[in-house]
Amino acid sequence: MAVGKFPIEASHIMMFARSIGDGNKIYYDEDYAKGGEAGGIIAPPTFVQASAQFDPDYGLRPKIGGDGWFGSGGKPTGVKPREDSVGSTGDSGGGGGLHAEQRYIYHRHPKVGDVLTATNKPGKSWEKEGKRSGKLVFSESITEYRDQDGELVVTAIGTGVRTERPVDQG
Amino acid sequence: MALKASELKVGDTYTERLVEDLKRTQVVMYAGASGDYNPVHTDELFTTKVAGYPGVFAHGMLTMGMTGMMLTNYVGDGRLTEFGVRFTNQVFPGDTLDSTATVTAINEGLVDIEVSTINQEGVEVAKGSAQARIDD
């Protein structure tokens, strides 16, 4: 995902850590974090995924004043999922796209006060025949997160897969 | 609390329970924090009637996030240099997940780790690898 400004904020890190069930004080207690090697509150390893919050075009968030949302309201769905909401946006599902793989390379760990930018480019893509879901089309997306000085902080390589039909269960 | 090369050997393992009886509310919390509001994770009506799945399922990235917690508890804060997983099976509310790190190599101040997260049936839901800085 391309993001012009991804501020690394303490309350966001605290909420993210809570959501993954991680009670490590390094994610919310500034005094504790200052005394450690990191020198302050840092982001959990998968936190950059939350840059979606700062992507104005992110397809998996209902838009204020937008033209509908594909989740249920009075009916099981509002509108059809946007084709472009799958694959390039990391974790996707439902409309035929799923998150197959994710890899991060940490040049350093983001810390509170950083303001990151993210640029995105397509990686490899390939096809495979799947037993449980028909033809599978995989595509990689490479996101580079840089800090306020232009230094590379995290490289994220996400692989999305589109399936012909929902994955058979069992 | 970082790992020390002098106290590590190939084959060492570390296991942690990531979650017991995963609640839908935790999946909602992850949606809110991460910003991924795909209804297949929180909207039962959409997921069963439109998407064609038996019920809502967790974000792959929630499983990876919890797996990352196991890793940072093992290698120490801010020590990871790489972390990647493949999502091999879906995770549903009610699942209990355990994750294991296995040391595969130690060299030049770095440890290579194999990562595996399984559910209560022993089915692997995430599989991957990581690398971390270690002390002498």
Image: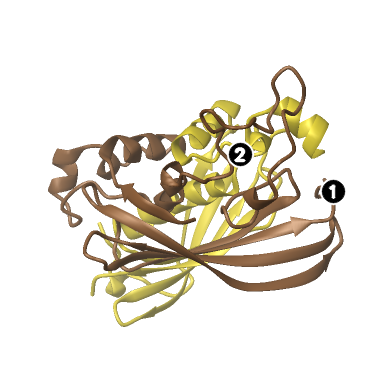
Chain colours: A brown, B yellow
Which of the 4 quarters of the picture holds residue B51? top right
Q: Amino acid at mark 1?
A: Asp
- Left or right of A23, for residue B32: right
Q: Is residue A125 above or below residue B60?
A: below
Which of the 4 quarters of the picture holds residue A128? bottom right
Q: Nearer the viewer, mark 1 or mark 2?
A: 1
Q: Mark 2 belongs to which subunit?
A: B
Residue at horizontal 59 percent and vertical 43 percent from the top: B59
Residue A7 locus on image (x, y percent): 29, 46
Tag 1 residue: A168
- The residue carrying pointer 1 sits among few (fewer than 14), some (14 to 19) or many (20 or more) residues within 10 Å by Cα, namely few
Tag 2 residue: B96
Q: Are marks 1 and 2 on the same chain?
A: no
Q: Is residue A43 above or below residue A9?
A: below
- Left or right of B33, for residue B80: left
Q: Which mark is residue A54?
A: none
Do residues under tags 1 and 2 come within 8 Å of each other at their CB atoms? no
